[in-house]
């Protein structure tokens, strides 16, 4: 596994903005879950159903702040917010590339809210199937700033159906291209019999947001196997 700095991924993906605080609201935890789904083995209909949960506290009843999620490659879909505990949300603005709302603590009690979204593919270089050497691989990248305050717990999880626990660049294998140095892997593509999970968390005292990139290499169908065979034969002949 290669662990490298991916500062370049901070541009162009889902970017989180902590808004102008109208009161003393503190984001104390962040848990981002991506469920990658597809029915075509070549990933033509790949999509990510995401949920970003933010825990927050308030200094006093009535404190409020605004939060925005910006995306400027392909707009996200099915965006909505749910709440738990002492948090309420209103003033939702769903623009072409931005989604904003206000987070209230009417009684001052702590609580949490979850921002839900669907990310379609392809959306440029960040989430798209690519054909190379007769094989299709799905590029999946996430780059975002943190809303949770520096040092607060921040976890990030990706699930994908099927067994992707083998690392490599061959059919049916997964490749970790890079992870920001502030992050620690806790589940390195663990298969539970139905789906594979990759999970990580921000290191103690870390301040960076998520910066991670993967490739998933498709198992080709009969046509793809024929193309792959021709490519391998040509390579053998060149040798």
Image (cartoon, rainbow, N blue to C red):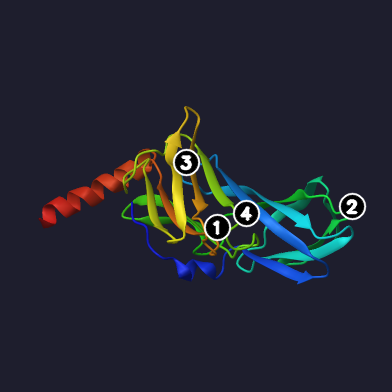
Q: Residue at x 75, y 49 (%)?
A: 112
Whole-angstrom CA distance, mark 1 to mark 3, is 15 Å
Q: Answer yes or no: do the residues labelled 3 and 2 have beta carbons within 8 Å?
A: no
Residue that protrudes farthest toward the left in the picture: 239
Which of 52 and 127 lies nearest the eye of the viewer?
Answer: 52
Disc with the residue nearer the chain's start (3 vs 4): 3
- The residue identified by callout 4 is 119
Is 182 placed above or below 41 here? Answer: below
Residue 16 lies left or right of residue 109; in this view the side is left
- Horizontally, residue 111 falls left or right of residue 228, namely right
Q: Which residue is mark 3?
A: 41
**Element carrying mark 2:** loop
Q: Position of residue 75 (x, y in %)?
A: 67, 62
Q: Which mark is residue 122?
A: 1
Asked where in the image residue 57 lies, by quadrant, the reply is bottom right
Answer yes or no: do the residues labelled 1 and 3 have beta carbons within 8 Å?
A: no
Q: Secondary structure at mark 3?
A: loop
Callout 4–callout 1 Cβ contact below 8 Å: no
**Which type of secondary structure does the marked residue at label 4 adopt?**
strand
Query: Is residue 65 in sight in this rendering?
Result: yes
Mark 1 Cα within 10 Å, few/some/many (few <14, many 20+)? Answer: many
Q: Under tag 1, what secondary structure?
A: loop
Residue shown at 31% from the left, 45% from the top = 170
Residue with the mark numbered 2: 107
Q: Earlier in the sequence, mark 3 or mark 2?
A: 3
Report whether 24 appears left or right of 234.
right
Q: CA distance from mark 3 to mark 2?
A: 50 Å
């Amino acid at each position: 596994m290669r662990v490298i700095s991916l500062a370049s991924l901070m541009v162009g993906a889902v970017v989180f903005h902590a808004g102008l605080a109208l009161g003393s609201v503190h984001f104390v935890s962040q848990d981002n879950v991506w469920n990658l789904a597809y029915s075509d083995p070549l990933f033509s209909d790949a999509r990510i159903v995401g949920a970003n949960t933010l825990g927050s506290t308030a200094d006093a009843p009535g404190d409020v702040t605004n939060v925005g999620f910006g995306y400027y490659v392909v707009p996200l879909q099915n965006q909505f917010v749910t709440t738990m505990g002492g948090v309420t949300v209103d003033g939702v603005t769903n623009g072409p590339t931005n989604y904003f709302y206000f987070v209230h603590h009417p009684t001052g009690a702590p609580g949490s809210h979850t921002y839900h979204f669907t990310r379609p593919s392809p959306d440029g270089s960040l989430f798209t199937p690519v054909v190379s050497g007769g094989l299709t691989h799905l590029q999946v990248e996430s780059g975002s700033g943190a809303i949770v305050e520096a040092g607060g717990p921040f976890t990030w999880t990706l699930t994908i159906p099927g067994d992707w626990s083998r690392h490599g660049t061959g059919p049916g294998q997964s490749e970790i291209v890079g992870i920001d140095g502030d992050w620690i892997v806790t589940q390195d593509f663990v298969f539970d019999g139905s789906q594979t999970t990759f999970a990580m968390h921000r290191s103690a005292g870390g301040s960076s947001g998520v910066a991670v990139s993967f490739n998933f290499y498709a198992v080709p169908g009969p046509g793809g196997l024929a193309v792959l065979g021709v490519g391998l034969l040509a390579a053998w002949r060149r040798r």
